[in-house]
Every structure is written in structure tokens, then in C-alpha cells.
Image: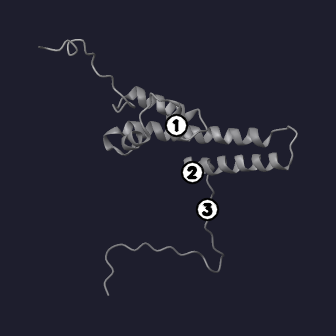
């Protein structure tokens, strides 16, 4: 005797985060990064319709998805600019501060400074200048080929 339960079965619903690559999903990820001072992991946890962290990392390392890597890099640069703006706001805060608040604001600025320097080193990173004195200039050598003893 056939079971009537099989006839009325509905297709299984997909469970979990989306895994399929699409330009729309990539644009959403990048737009959320660009306007947030939060990390990717936090952004993903607040937006359950986004792929998992490991999926996004695999897309970024996939040579066929260079378009996403370019968008992601620009979004991180925009995020560095946002962090720089926030540093100014924190530093310019005129509220009544006690020592704890001042230390907290300093930590907030230092953290943003560090992250901005890593995200956009040409703009926010430390500048390194090599120089020597007139009597002992810095000498650089380029060695090519094999060294034979």
C-alpha cells in the first residue's frame, strides 16, 4: 500500500549561508565594508544573508574572481578613510573627560590608526626614509644570477 505522505512532501529548504558567487553579493559585501568600522567577521555575523567568512576568503584567493578582489581592495581603502575620519571625531570630542575616558579615547584612536595603516599603507602607514651622510652614503647592490664558490 503506497504512503500518501510521499505525495504531499514539500521540497527541502536550503539551510545555511549562500555559497553561490554573484556580483550582487560581492557588491553588498564591499558596500557594507566601505561604510563600517567593523571587521569582515562582524559584518557577516550581522548579515545572515551573506556567505561565510571562509567562502568569502576562498573567493578572494580565486584567480577567476579578480573583479571581487579589486572591489574588496577598494572597499578596504574606503574603510581606512572612514577610520581616519573617526579618529578626528574622537580626538575632537569636547565632553567632560576623566582619565579613564581619555585613556579609552587614546586606545580607540590608536586601534583605528593601526588598522588604517594596514589597510592603506601608502596613505596612513609610517614613512620610511633612508639617508646617509655625505662621507658615508648608503650603498645598494643588486646581485643577479648564481653565486659560485
Q: Position of residue 54 (x, y in %)?
A: 40, 43
> SS for tag 1?
helix
Precedes in sequence: disc 1 or disc 3: 1
Precedes in sequence: disc 3 or disc 2: 2
- The residue indicated by pointer 2 is 118
Q: Position of residue 142 (x, y in %)?
A: 43, 72
> SS for tag 3?
loop
Vertical relation: 2 (above or below) 140: above
- The residue indicated by pointer 3 is 128
Is 145 displayed left or right of 85 in the figure?
A: left
* Residue at x 49% of width, y 35% of height: 44
Q: Quadrant of residue 130?
A: bottom right
- The residue indicated by pointer 1 is 75
Precedes in sequence: disc 2 or disc 1: 1
Q: Position of residue 68 (x, y in %)?
A: 40, 36
Q: Please identify the residue farthest to the left as the structure is shown.
A: 1
Quadrant of the frame with the C terminus: bottom left
Q: Position of residue 70 (x, y in %)?
A: 43, 39
Q: How many marks?
A: 3
Q: Nearer the viewer, mark 1 or mark 3?
A: 1
Separation of marks 3 and 2 at Cα, in angstroms = 15 Å
Quadrant of the frame with the N terminus: top left
> SS for tag 2?
helix
Amino acid at each position: 500500500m503506497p504512503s500518501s505522505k510521499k505525495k504531499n512532501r514539500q521540497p527541502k529548504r536550503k539551510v545555511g549561508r549562500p555559497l553561490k558567487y554573484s556580483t550582487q553579493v560581492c557588491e553588498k559585501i564591499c558596500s557594507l565594508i566601505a561604510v563600517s568600522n567593523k571587521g569582515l567577521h562582524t559584518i557577516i555575523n550581522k548579515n545572515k544573508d551573506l556567505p561565510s567568512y571562509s567562502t568569502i576568503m576562498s573567493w578572494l584567493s580565486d584567480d577567476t574572481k579578480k573583479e571581487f578582489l579589486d572591489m574588496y581592495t577598494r572597499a578596504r581603502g574606503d574603510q581606512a578613510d572612514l577610520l581616519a575620519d573617526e579618529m578626528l571625531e574622537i580626538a575632537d570630542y569636547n565632553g567632560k573627560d576623566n582619565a579613564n575616558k581619555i585613556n579609552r579615547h587614546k586606545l580607540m584612536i590608536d586601534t583605528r590608526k593601526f588598522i588604517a595603516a594596514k589597510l592603506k599603507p601608502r596613505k596612513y602607514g609610517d614613512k620610511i626614509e633612508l639617508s646617509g651622510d655625505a662621507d658615508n652614503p648608503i650603498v645598494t647592490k643588486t646581485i643577479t644570477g648564481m653565486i659560485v664558490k
